[in-house]
């Protein structure tokens, strides 16, 4: 697997949690270890991007949804395969 930035991992977690997900589902869906998923979930909850309901599901907050849409928009704009290479344009 290629290197992923923190932004890539956070985007994956937010996407998985958009419909509500357990810690285990997020861990497997984002390809993280248990220690990593705990660290990321604690961080995202502290930043009010995720909440944990009484059943144990993690869900996006309004801020989390806005951030996910922003990340997805940036990814679309910067997608490498959509634009011709700069060298060929010169």
Image: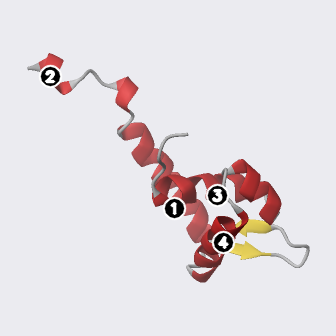
Q: CA distance from mark 1 to mark 3?
A: 12 Å
Residue 16: horizontal and vertical position, in percent?
70, 53
Q: Horizontally, is 84 left or right of 44 in the view?
A: left
Q: Residues within 10 Å of mark 2 (few under 14, many from 20)?
A: few
- Where residue 54 sits: x, y (%)? 88, 79
Residue depicted at 81% across the width and 60% down the height: 24
| Residue picked out by circle 1 | 67
Say whether marks 3 and 4 touch (CB < 8 Å).
Answer: yes
Taking the view exactly as shown, the residue that stands out farthest to the right is: 55
Q: Is residue 11 above or below residue 62?
A: above
At label 4, counting other C-alpha atoms closer than 10 Å, the crowd grade (few under 14, some 14-19, many 20 or more) is: many
- Numbered badge on residue 13: 3
Specify whether 67 is left or right of 20: left
Q: Which mark is residue 86?
A: none
Label 2 secondary element: helix
CA gap, disc 1 and disc 2? 32 Å
| Callouts 2 and 4 close, C-beta under 8 Å | no
Front label number (1 vs 3): 3
Which residue is denoted by mark 4 in the rendering?
41
């Amino acid at each position: 697997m290629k290197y992923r930035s923190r932004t890539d991992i956070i985007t994956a977690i937010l996407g998985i949690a958009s419909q509500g997900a357990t810690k285990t589902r997020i861990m497997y869906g984002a390809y993280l270890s248990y220690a990593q998923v705990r660290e990321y979930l604690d961080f995202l909850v502290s930043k009010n991007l995720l909440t944990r309901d009484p059943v144990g599901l993690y869900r996006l907050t309004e801020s989390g949804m806005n951030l996910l849409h922003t990340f997805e928009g940036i990814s679309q704009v910067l997608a490498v395969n959509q634009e011709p290479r700069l060298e060929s344009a010169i």
